[in-house]
Image (tube, grey):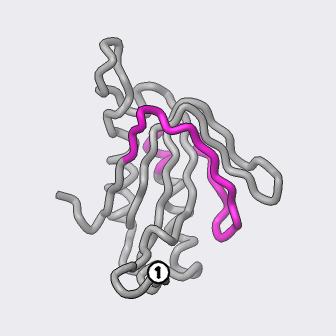
Amino acid sequence: MKAVIQRVSQASVTIEGQKVADIQQGLLVLVGFEDQDNQEDINWLTAKIANLRIFADENQVMNLSLKETNGEMIIVSQFTLHALTKKGNRPSYIKASKPDIAIPLYESFVAQMETELGKKVQTGQFGADMKVALLNDGPVTLIIDTKNKE
């Protein structure tokens, strides 16, 4: 499982001209799944993201988590995070899970994140053509891969 975490001042997701998610200060999380991902990976990654100390404290030091700032979150499924680009110029998505595996993992990820944060998170729509807008704050962008927990 791979995730791109972006600290944002604002973010939104629009599908077919309809805004389906809209937040202010918080995190936009893009997440992609592989067939071997499991609940243990989900639990580890959601806890890691919810507790990342990437928000400024009173001294303007990145020392607070999303939980501590009561910030908002949007989670968007992003199979292209597993693109293989070594050969040629056309990415291969062979490592990305197909919907029958990815959808239950995505739903479990969202539910676990809501448990971690103790509140609802907003989402895109799995498989939809989404327009994602964001104002990256910092910029702060992190990439986490559950296959590399070091």
| Residues in magenta, as a range | 113-141
Q: Residue furthest front?
A: 89
Q: Is residue 52 left or right of residue 29?
A: left
Q: Residue furthest right?
A: 17
Residue 145, percent from left and from top: 31, 62
Q: Residue furthest top?
A: 58
Q: Amino acid at mark 1?
A: Pro
Q: Is residue 18 left or right of residue 61?
A: right
Q: Residue at x 45, y 68 (%)?
A: 81
Q: Is residue 12 left or right of residue 41?
A: right
Few, some or many residues within 10 Å of mark 1 (<14, 14–19, 20+): few
Residue 150, percent from left and from top: 17, 57
Of residues 18 and 119, the one drawn nearer to the viewer in this rendering: 18
Q: Residue at x 52, y 46 (%)?
A: 28
Residue 125, placed above or below residue 102: above
The quadrant the N terminus occupies is bottom left
Q: Which residue is mark 1?
A: 91
Residue 116, percent from left and from top: 43, 43
Of residues 88 and 16, the one drawn nearer to the viewer in this rendering: 88
Numbered disc 1: secondary structure: loop
